[in-house]
Amino acid sequence: MAKSDRLNVKQEKFCQEHVKCGNASQAYRTVYSTEKMKDKTVWEKASRLLGTHKVRARVDEIQHHAQIRAAMTVEKLIAMHLQDRKLARKNKQAAAAIAANNSIAKLLGYMVEKSEQKVDVEHKFVVAEEAKSNVMKLISETKKEKAEPTQQIHIIEDRVH
């Protein structure tokens, strides 16, 4: 590839963004500094950039790869895992067969990865109690000031902020 056929970093990013959003003007705004440009100018520059041979070729290439990836469906993945399982059983490789079964189950949604999440419940309770106590104190203070209920809310908001 000749040096003139290579894309610079911004051109490559423009191509990626264009494929992602499908809109040349939006892709141009994402990559280039367009704050001071009119919409018409952005559209013209985006169209001109997209019209260059090397940019158009790269967009086509990215779209082609996306189509190939999209063609890899769950059914194809399952078929591949079934072949792997069959081969593993034929070769008496129980672990590989089980791994293939697990992969199929995950693809079908029968198995879900679980992760343990620890929460400090005592800390959250203490924080909630403190918040409740503070709100109750603010309410009692506003009642002492003999404010109307709507005024009480505004007084509390002012004190909280």
Image: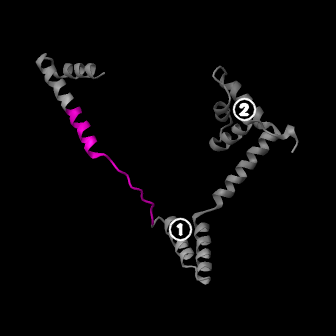
Quick check: 63 above or below 161? Answer: below
Whole-angstrom CA distance, mark 2 to mark 1, is 44 Å
The image shows residue 118 at horizontal and vertical percentages of 35, 50
The way the protein has been coloured in the rendering is: one colour
Quick check: 37 above or below 55? Answer: above
What is the secondary structure assignment of the residue under circle 1?
helix
Instruction: Quickly name the residue at label 2.
Output: 46
Dot 2 crowding, Cα within 10 Å, few <14, some 14–19, many 20+ = many
Quadrant of the snapshot with the N terminus: top right
Of all residues shown, which one is farthest toward the top?
145
Name the residue located 19 percent from the left edge and 24 percent from the top edge.
Answer: 138
In this view, the residue in front, 114 or 150, is: 114
Quick check: 94 above or below 16? Answer: below
Quadrant position of residue 120? top left
Amino acid type of the residue that numbered disc 1 sits on in the rendered structure: Ser
In contact (CB < 8 Å): disc 2 and disc 1:
no
Query: Does label 2 or label 1 sit earlier along the sequence?
Result: 2
The image shows residue 42 at horizontal and vertical percentages of 69, 27
What is the secondary structure assignment of the residue under circle 2?
helix
Quadrant position of residue 130? top left
Residue 58, magenta (yes or no): no
Q: Is residue 133 left or right of residue 29?
A: left
* Range of residues picked out in magenta: 111-132
Instruction: Quickly name the residue at label 1.
Output: 103
Q: Is residue 124 left or right of residue 3?
A: left
Dot 1 crowding, Cα within 10 Å, few <14, some 14–19, many 20+ = some
